[in-house]
Amino acid sequence: PCPMGCPGVWSFDDFGALVSPALLKKWQQRSVERTKKQALEAAKEILDKAQQDAEADSADPDLKLVREHVAAIRKMLRPACPYCGMAFESLAGCLSVTCGARDRNGRQVSGCGQVFCGGCMTKRPCPKKCGHAFVQPGELHRRWRVWRMQRPTEYLREHFRGGPKDDHGGGARSDAILERVLRGTRSDLEVVGVWPLPGFAL
C-alpha cells in the first residue's frame, strides 16, 4: 500500500525505482519471509479447526448424521442431470435439455449427453409431459420451485417421524436431529423460496 496512507497500491517497478538495489533485495527477502509466515499461520489455523471438528464429532455422535442429511438436502436443491448428476445453473429456452456440451466435431466434452426434462428435472419420458416447450425465466423458476419443495419434503418424510428410512431410534432423538437438519438447511431453502417446507416448519 501507499506509504503516505492513501488507498492506492504501488507497483513493484515504481517501488524499485525509488530505493537502492540493496534495500530492494532486503525488502524482497522480508516479503518472502512474511508470506511464508502467513502461510504457516493459515495452515496451523486449518489444522486446529480440523482438530476441533474431529473433537466435536466424537463428543456429538449425531453431528455426522446431521451433516449428511443437510448435504443431501442441499444437493437436491441444485438443478442437475437426473442421469449423471452434473449440476448446472440455467438453461436457454427449450425444456428438453441435453446434458453437457459437444465440441465442433460433435464429441461429448462434458456431461453424459442424455436428454431430460429441464422443467421438473426428470428422466424421459417426463411424467408431466413438458415436451419441447419454450418457457420464460419466471415460468421456469416457478416449475423449479415445485420440485425444490417436493424433493426435500419427501426426503424428510422418509427419514424422520417414523418414515420407512427413519433409523434414528425414534422419539425425542429423531425429533432433535430433524430440528438440527431444518436449522442447517433453512437459509438454503429460503434462498430458493421454499421455506417452510410443508409440515416441517421450526
Image (cartoon, helix red, strand yellow):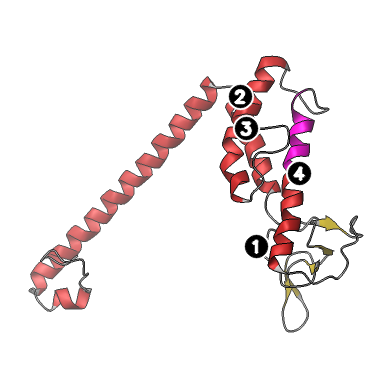
Q: Residue at x 78, y 62 (%)?
A: 118
Residue 158 is drawn in which quadrant?
A: top right
Q: Position of residue 197 (x, y in %)?
A: 69, 38
Above or below 121: residue 186: above
C-alpha distance separating marks 2 and 4: 23 Å
Q: Nearer the viewer, mark 1 or mark 2?
A: 1
Q: Which residue is mark 3?
A: 181
Q: Position of residue 161 (x, y in %)?
A: 76, 24
Q: What's the distance in space between the residues labelled 1 and 3, CA to CA?
A: 25 Å
| Figure check: 193 above or below 157 | below
Can residue 80 be seen in this snapshot? Answer: no
In this rendering, the label closer to the viewer, 2 or 3? 3
The residue under label 4 is which amino acid type? Arg
Question: Residue at horizontal 83%, vertical 27%?
Answer: 164
Mark 2 crowdedness (10 Å alpha carbons): few <14, some 14-19, many ≥20: some
What SS does tag 1 mark?
loop
**Region rendered in magenta:** 152-161
Residue 47 falls left or right of residue 132: left
Q: Is residue 197 above or below residue 130?
A: above
Distance from the alpha carbon under mark 2 to that under mark 3:
11 Å
Residue identified by numbered label 4: 151
Which of the two labelled residues, at mark 2 and mark 3, occupies the earlier sequence position? 2
Residue 14 on image: x %, y %: 17, 77
